[in-house]
Image (spheres, grey):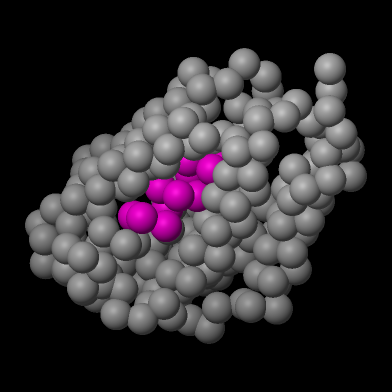
Amino acid sequence: MRKFLWLSLFAVGFAYMESATVVYLRTISGRLMDIFPMEILDPHIGMIEIGRELVTLLILVMVAIIAENSFVRRFYVFLFVFGLWDIFYYFWLKVFIGWPRSLLDADILFLIPLPWIGPVIAPLLVAFILCFSGGIAIVRNRNFSITTKDAVLFLSGSLILIFNFILPSLKEIKEFGMEGLKYINPFPFNWFLYFPGLLFIALGLLRPVMFYQDNK
């Protein structure tokens, strides 16, 4: 339980820093509340932002590596910290600037390899599943394994969701080239593709921690 509390504290604090950075970027761009159409202020700033995202992921991975000593448990610690960090990222944004005004507000979720676009509730539901499954693994503190079926479900669901999130970017590039990314229309969001992906991820992650067998 002590590990769970320390990891939670880290995730909440790291989310504060992430949210503060985004507030600064939005303030500089003059787009504090409405970020669409999406226009990158400066290619140099855009590259810095991509680098910041990569470093953020690296920090979360390093925390998981330090916290545990097996691949599977490190993986679930990463899921927990990532999920809680993402949830509190939006929490702090709401505290700082009153955004999102609604869980259906569109957001730019990620920039690698293309902008990920979706309503706020979409990454939050994923984050809840990651946080819940990772939290169970940390609190139970048991060794368990991931079957091939679990891995296939998780990877399939992840690929479906990633494709769905970058679909608006792909459509704009197909029609207008890379310049089209400045004018992405975040709606309509493809919920029919989203929910199967979310279900696959949930099944792939929850079965190992809910119905585990000790590996001794």
Which quadrant of the figure has residue 139?
Answer: top right
How far across and how far down the image is residue 172, in percent? Answer: 49, 69
- Drawn side of residue 127 relative to residue 95, left or right: right
Residue displayed at 79% across by 31% down: 144
- Drawn side of residue 213 relative to residue 183, left or right: right
Q: How many marks?
A: 0
Q: Nearer the viewer, residue 159 or 171?
A: 159
How far across and how far down the image is residue 205, in percent? Answer: 73, 48
Residue 15 visible, this angle: yes
Q: Nearer the viewer, residue 31 or 122?
A: 122
Which quadrant of the figure has residue 44?
Answer: top left
Q: Quadrant of the C terminus?
A: top right
Residue displayed at 25% across by 48% down: 16
Q: What type of secondary structure mainly makes up the magenta span?
A: helix
Residue 25 visible, this angle: no
Residue displayed at 25% across by 62% down: 93
- Drawn side of residue 72 relative to residue 129, left or right: right
Q: Is residue 78 above or below residue 131?
A: above
82 in magenta: yes
168 in magenta: no
Residue displayed at 38% across by 67% down: 107
How far across and how far down the image is residue 5, in percent? Answer: 43, 38
How far across and how far down the image is residue 199, in percent? Answer: 74, 64
Q: Is residue 213 above or below residue 134?
A: above
Q: Is residue 209 above or below residue 26?
A: above
Q: Nearer the viewer, residue 72 or 139?
A: 139
Which quadrant of the figure has residue 164?
Answer: bottom right
Query: Magenta stretch?
Result: 79-89
